[in-house]
Amino acid sequence: MKPVIAVVGRPNVGKSTLFNRMTKSRDAIVADFAGLTRDRHYGDGRSGEHSFIVVDTGGFEPDSTTGIVKEMAKQTRQAVAEADAVIFVVDVRAGVAGQDHDIARYLRATGKKVVLAANKAEGMSESPLLAEFFELGLGAPHPVSAAHGEGVRSLTDAALADFHFDEDEEAEPEEGAPIRLAVAGRPNVGKSTLINTWLGEERLVAFDQPGTTRDAITVPFERNGQKFELIDTAGLRRKGKVFEAIEKFSVVKTLQAIADANVVLLLLDATQGVTDQDAHIAGYILESGRAVVLAVNKWDAVDEYQKQTLARSIEMRLAFLKFAPVLHISAIKRQGLGPVWKSIADAHASATRKMSTPVLTRLLQDAVEHQTPKRAGAFRPKLRYAHQGGMNPPIIVIHGNSLEHVTDVYKRFLEGRFREHFKLTGTPLRIEMRSSRNPFDDKGR
């Protein structure tokens, strides 16, 4: 399971800058919570071979009791409660503020691992100004400059130092291994109803398997001889184990479930259409490379006009998941659930399909004969051969010359040919271009 790092601190100390530096992107996933006036931002970071989830929070005032500041503090408390490690950001140029002491006192009481980041410390790694931050009682400060990237890597490594990563997290799936299935979606979309319907209808034996501080639960079950592991995001945990401050819907749990899954069932609400939050979750599924099946719940509760409007909404707002099958179900009435299982099995089979090099190369050559890539100035890309570079998601690596000039349109053309031949459904397909080095490039230098 991916570790979670929460970035906290008082306003204007550079938390968001550090977040963007750690995720190497400004395209953070945003969770839109009704009633909250400030959004938390979620993103993926990577340190060496290991990935993690970063949570950016608003300015934190632990003792606030009114208005927007109270809501921001509530969000930050949830982020801290769900995190494996906390990076507490302070401003080395402004010095220790009274609010820093309040935050430090709160963080010490949580018992979480806390790493102190003294931001805006460019050129000040040996500055005596760092010494005053020892009084926060959180150990030695790490001097960093989020704006310039100085010290961010060592800060991240310190935050992740005690976390145990699974060595086989990217390993090739074993034959006969259970399909790890995550049911994702917004609150009140029907996830719990669907899961409870499965567990009752199929007469499955389920048990709680704790193993992390966030009480993630895996529910093993079997259907028609196929074993599954359901990664819970829908509240199957016992009430006594739930930390009261954590909201019923946790974005962190959903993101971790997606990252741990082989297949994600994204549940939509027919009565509400496709919301921004649906699109954000769908985008994360695509970024994670997971196989996905779209299920529109409460299909029995909408009229014909609403059905047509919803179909157009899915086409437009989730166009990037056009490879995913769309099914219409009613969890509460147990309608349409059979095809869901078939689509899940098909998506998993597609995501783990083995594609031989001779077949891929022949398909590539046939595609080039049918339509050659566009010339770019004096260069015309030459696509020579292809092989499989990975699975779940399937990756096809194409070798040749001047491949940096291959357009996205042509890549989509190739993807369509590969998908059609191998009957890939419900899984993203990634195409990587690797150009051979020209030995004459260094001549004359």
Image (cartoon, rainbow, N blue to C red):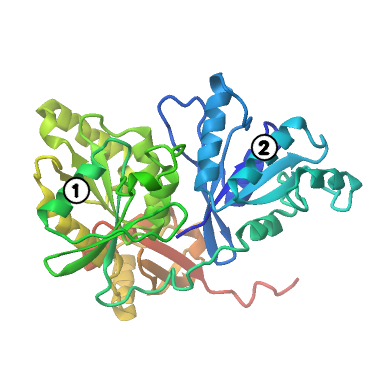
Within 10 angstroms of label 1, few (less than 14), some, or many (20 or more) residues?
Answer: some
Under mark 1, the amino acid is Asn
- The picture places residue 420, in percent across and down from the top left corner, at 22, 62
Could you tell me which secondary element the residue under label 2 belongs to?
Answer: helix
Q: Is residue 146 visible?
A: yes
If the image is split into quadrants, where does the N terminus sit? bottom left
Residues at circles 1 and 2 in contact by the CB criterion of under 8 Å: no
Residue furthest toward the top?
Answer: 67
Under mark 2, the amino acid is Ile
Q: Residue at x 73, y 40 (%)?
A: 90
- The picture places residue 167, in percent across and down from the top left corner, at 48, 73
Measured in 3D between alpha carbons, the distance from the residue under mark 1 to the one under mark 2, in whole angstroms, is 41 Å
Within 10 angstroms of label 2, few (less than 14), some, or many (20 or more) residues?
Answer: many
Q: Is residue 121 visible?
A: no
- The picture places residue 330, in percent across and down from the top left corner, at 13, 40
For residue 392, the mark is none
Q: Residue at x 57, y 22 (%)?
A: 65
Image position of 362 with respect to 287: above or below: below
Q: Residue at x 55, y 25 (%)?
A: 70
Could you tell me which secondary element the residue under label 1 belongs to?
Answer: helix
Image position of 404 with respect to 106: above or below: below
**In the rendered view, does 264 fall on the left or right side of 45?**
left
Residue 261 figure quarter: bottom left
If the image is split into quadrants, where does the C terminus sit? bottom right
Residue furthest toward the right?
Answer: 128
Q: Along the line of sight, which residue is nearer the eye, 159 or 351?
A: 159
- Disc 1: which residue: 196
- Disc 2: which residue: 103
- The picture places residue 127, in percent across and down from the top left corner, at 89, 48
- Mark toward the start of the polypeptide (1 vs 2): 2
